[in-house]
């Protein structure tokens, strides 16, 4: 009964089978039908056993059982309690799949497969052909999809909304194709950790800009909770999976002048090659320049030309190569796949064993692209979003992360304007961004992340596309960078639109973007922040005072402190020196501090009043007793090295979060929180800033 989903997809067809198969390939979890490759290695007993497991893979297990014929609809219903109507529909799909395995691909069988909703790629996988071969065969058989309009009037009036879905169970198209200049905007698909609604914001604003310029804007997306799939946002909406086949079908009927992939996150970027193959020109930065930013060797050459420093590193494909590089660089190292959002699969490794573990996980999901190994640098992480017209560049502002490098940018508290960076560092960041944008021939948006170590600036990565901070920086600076980027793609210049190139003047207010986490909903998940993104949302605090902005941001994120004025501190040895000043500040705002032995001794020696509490395996009262007594407001627990779920720290963090206790795993976040509490202690009325007037 505990919700765990972070997003959803929607699909439309004239029958359930087609709709469920569209939904499956819209999920972006590496499937294109009701089949998971890993289940091929399962024996029948394991498939049957997994029917009883209630999880996100259950529908795939049901299909596998029906595909193999190892359980009847009645038996599966008895185990799963899934209505038989749905089970018979899934059986219809697996019956056609089995026919494709056993029979020749005749026109009648091809039509049956397409009518049931199987993608060309699925038919190809089953029959041993390629998707292109299946498409060619299908077209020679004149088996093509038709597009029907969604009836938004429930048949009471004639519908006139340009809102379409494809089906192979129709004879006529209802699409009204115009001769106007048109652009397809690819949406961002389902919301998940790492790719949230920020990208839909970008898609919608780009559509508004295109329509303002008299261009017919066509959206392809499949997420019902986004604004882009409201039927009155674009000139036309195709509610379809974001796969090469489904996009190609739309391209064939609309014949667009251009496509935009810059605003749809990694979902859209991954379709660049397919669109190029279709002969659709990409608006904005060229595909080869986007690839140059992801390709380690090419990007290193770009950085060398630009005179920009980065952490030493290399590209690898195997665990053995990764370990050799790690030994050369020295631990700790950052291990990350390329072409991903949200730091998916990214980890900080401190040993050969962790390299082996991380590489095994990464290669399970990303086998076609190389793995990047970088020396881990600890400093202040900063980032910029900028818009470039091919000549000039506009940077609305420099954002600074409160958490030091090593915490994913999406999980960091972000501050605009940067508060601790010198003028020299800010100017260096602006200059480096300008050089990169020009060398990568950026037209539109670029996001660049840096590490500042003293007065030295190192680049982390550059992405010539929209990012999750675009809505934030646009709103708090008043610079509509998506609108500007869309116009730049169509040839407009920043100066012609009234903007002065370079780093924009800083605002008088301070705006803080605070991550929001849902880890309490996922039992057994590690909650400590690191290089892989875990937050599921964000909120904004804005004020002319830094501490008040922090206070508002924490409040907005649901952190309501204090209630009992009691907290637990247990930190790793490497953090014991740094925790002293933080603990002293919590003591001053009225907190009673409990700490485990090692931390308690350090705090007591520093003159801080602290109550020692025993570790989990010791006699009562233990840390667990305090947490389960529901009298603790806050836990500060920084993880020790290693990923053992039986460790005290992991168990403390999970128990705290599951009992509703605010839990912080970064000392930088702990320091920020006490700053906000110090503001609260002053009992000032919060100031109000009208964001619409920025």
Image: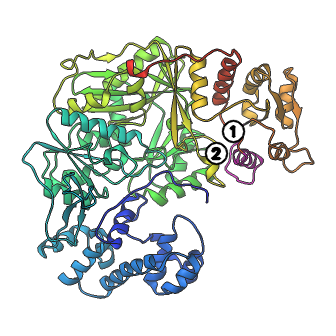
> In which quadrant is the N terminus drawn?
bottom right
Q: Residue furthest left?
A: 179
Q: Residue furthest front?
A: 156
Question: Which quadrant of the structure image shows residue 664?
Answer: top right
Question: Which quadrant of the structure image shows residue 466?
Answer: top left
Q: Are marks 1 and 2 in contact (CB under 8 Å)?
A: yes
Q: Residue furthest right?
A: 619
- On the picture, is 443 further left or further right than 420? left
Q: Residue 444, relative to residue 532: is it above or below? A: above
- On the picture, is 597 further left or further right than 198? right
Q: Under tag 1, what secondary structure?
A: strand
User: Mark 1 and mark 2: span between their CA atoms?
Assistant: 9 Å
Q: Residue 9, relative to residue 620: is it above or below? A: below
Q: Residue at x 78, y 48 (%)?
A: 648
Q: Residue at x 47, y 71 (%)?
A: 60
- State whether residue 331 appears in this view: no
Question: Which quadrant of the structure image shows residue 588?
Answer: top right
> Is residue 631 located in the magenta-colored stretch of the structure?
no
Q: How is the image coloured?
A: rainbow
Q: Under tag 2, what secondary structure?
A: loop
> In which quadrant is the C terminus drawn?
top left
What residue span does the magenta drawing correspond to? 634-659
Label 2 sits on residue: 527
Q: Residue 278, relative to residue 81: is it above or below? A: above
> Is residue 645 located in the magenta-colored stretch of the structure?
yes
- On the picture, is 405 further left or further right than 662? left
Which of the two marks, 1 or 2, is nearer to us in this view? 1
Query: Which of the labelled discs sits on residue 663, or is there none?
Result: 1
Position in image of residue 396 (x %, y %):
36, 21
Position in image of residue 13 (x %, y %):
29, 66
Compare marks 1 and 2 and give the one earlier in the sequence: 2
Position in image of residue 322 (x %, y %):
51, 49
């Amino acid at each position: 009964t505990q919700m765990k989903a972070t997003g959803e997809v929607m699909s439309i067809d004239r029958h359930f089978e087609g709709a469920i198969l569209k939904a499956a390939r819209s999920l972006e979890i590496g499937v294109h039908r009701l089949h998971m490759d890993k289940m091929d290695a399962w024996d029948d007993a394991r498939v049957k056993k997994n029917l009883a497991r209630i999880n996100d893979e259950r529908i795939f297990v049901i299909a596998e059982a029906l595909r193999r014929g190892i359980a009847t609809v009645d038996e599966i219903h008895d185990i799963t309690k899934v209505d038989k109507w749905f089970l018979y529909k899934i059986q219809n799909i697996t019956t056609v799949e089995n026919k494709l395995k056993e029979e020749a691909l005749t026109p009648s069988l091809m039509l049956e497969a397409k009518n049931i909703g199987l993608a060309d790629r699925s038919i190809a996988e089953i029959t041993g052909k390629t998707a292109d071969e299946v498409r060619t065969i299908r077209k020679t058989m004149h088996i093509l999809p038709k597009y029907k309009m969604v009836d938004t009037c429930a048949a009471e009036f004639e519908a006139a909304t340009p809102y379409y879905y494809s089906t192979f169970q129709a004879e006529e198209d209802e699409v009204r194709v115009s001769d106007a200049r048109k652009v397809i905007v690819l949406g961002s698909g389902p919301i998940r950790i790492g790719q949230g609604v920020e990208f839909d914001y970008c898609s919608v604003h780009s559509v508004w800009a295109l329509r303002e310029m008299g261009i017919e804007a066509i959206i392809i997306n499949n997420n019902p909770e986004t604004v882009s799939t409201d039927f009155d946002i674009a000139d036309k909406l195709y509610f379809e999976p974001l796969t090469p086949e489904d996009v190609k079908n739309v391209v064939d009927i609309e014949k667009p002048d251009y496509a935009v992939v810059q605003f749809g996150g990694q979902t859209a970027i991954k379709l660049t090659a397919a669109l190029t193959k279709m002969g659709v020109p990409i608006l904005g930065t060229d595909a080869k320049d986007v690839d140059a930013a992801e390709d380690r060797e090419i990007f290193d050459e770009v950085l060398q030309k630009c005179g920009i420093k980065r952490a030493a590193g290399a590209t690898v494909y195997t665990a053995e190569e990764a370990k050799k590089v790690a030994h050369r660089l020295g631990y700790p190292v950052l291990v990350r796949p390329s072409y991903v959002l949200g730091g998916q699969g990214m980890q900080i490794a401190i040993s050969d064993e962790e390299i082996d573990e991380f590489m095994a996980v990464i290669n399970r999901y990303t086998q076609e692209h190389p793995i990047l190994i970088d020396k881990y640098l600890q400093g202040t992480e900063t980032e910029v979003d900028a818009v470039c017209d091919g000549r000039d560049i506009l940077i609305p502002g420099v954002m600074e992360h409160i958490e030091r490098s090593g915490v994913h940018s999406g999980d960091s508290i972000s501050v605009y304007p940067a508060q601790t960076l010198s003028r020299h560092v800010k100017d260096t960041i602006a200059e480096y961004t300008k050089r990169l944008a020009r060398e990568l021939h950026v037209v539109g948006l670029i996001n660049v992340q840096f590490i500042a170590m003293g007065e030295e600036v190192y680049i982390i990565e550059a992405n010539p596309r929209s990012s999750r901070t675009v809505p934030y920086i646009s709103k708090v600076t008043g610079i509509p960078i998506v609108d500007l980027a869309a116009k730049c793609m169509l040839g407009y210049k920043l100066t012609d639109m009234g903007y002065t190139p370079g780093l924009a003047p800083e605002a008088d207010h301070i705006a803080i973007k605070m991550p929001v986490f849902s880890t309490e909903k996922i039992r057994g998940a590690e909650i400590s922040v690191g290089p892989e993104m875990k937050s599921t949302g964000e909120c904004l605090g804005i004020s002319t005072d830094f501490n008040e902005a922090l206070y508002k941001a924490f409040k907005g994120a649901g952190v309501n402190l204090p209630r009992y004025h009691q907290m637990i501190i247990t930190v790793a040895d490497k953090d014991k020196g740094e925790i002293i000043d933080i603990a002293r500040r919590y003591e001053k705002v009225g907190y009673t501090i409990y700490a485990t032995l090692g931390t308690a001794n350090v705090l007591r020696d520093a003159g801080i009043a602290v109550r020692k509490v025993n570790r989990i395996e010791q006699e009562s009262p233990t840390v667990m007793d305090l947490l389960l007594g529901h009298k603790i407001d806050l836990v500060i627990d920084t993880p020790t090295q290693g990923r053992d779920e039986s460790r005290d720290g992991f168990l403390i963090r999970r128990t705290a979060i599951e009992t509703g206790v605010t839990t912080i795993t970064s000392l930088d976040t702990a320091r920020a929180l006490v700053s906000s509490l110090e503001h609260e202690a002053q009992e000032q009325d919060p100031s109000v800033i009208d964001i619409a007037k920025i």
